[in-house]
Image: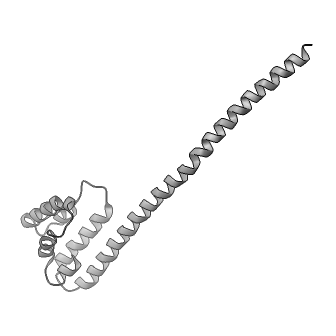
Amino acid sequence: MALLMQHSNVQVSIAKSLDGAPKILVPEINALLQRLKEQPKALSSYTDFCKNFDIPETTSCMKMLYAISESGTGDAKVQIQNLLVQVQEMRNRAAERRNKSSAFQVKMLYSYPVFGASIKLLGDLVVGMMFLFEMLSEAGGM
């Protein structure tokens, strides 16, 4: 988007980005383009992008695109840079979440054997105590 926006406005850049977009985003981008044709000046046209998903960063980025669209080309480079920074932050957060998930899975891999061994030791302790009490009761009954 940033490269396309250097030479085109926001709506044209979105339309051009459709060709290289991931397949899962194509219906959302088509809906966005349709909303932009109907109401190009409405903020809701931008913020309704991927509204069915719980991704607050998307709304923030779309608000920035709206601001770029409304302001024209005056401060577009700074706004594009801010947009790129936010996209990178979103990618970093997603990678961090994946890493936390992987770390939790590895931690659980080590916890399961410890939990199983603890239950076995507890069972052995109960059986041993029962055996000990039985021996003591037989020894005391003589």
Percent x, y of residue 27: 15, 58
Q: Give whichever of 26, 47 is nearer the camera.
A: 26
Q: Give whichever of 99, 35 is nearer the camera.
A: 99
Percent x, y of residue 113: 59, 45
The correct choice, above or below, for 16 with respect to 138 in the image is below
The correct choice, above or below, for 125 with respect to 66 in the image is above
Which residue is at 27% across, 55% downward? 53
Percent x, y of residue 39: 9, 65
Q: Give whichever of 12, 114 is nearer the camera.
A: 114
Side of 44 where 100 appears, left or right: right
Which residue is at 43% across, 60% downward? 97
Side of 113 where 28 appears, left or right: left
* Displayed quadrant of residue 83: bottom left
Report the colour scheme: one colour
* Displayed quadrant of residue 139: top right
Of the 4 image quadrants, the one containing the C terminus is top right
Q: Residue furthest left?
A: 38
The correct choice, above or below, for 24 with respect to 115 in the image is below
Percent x, y of residue 82: 31, 78
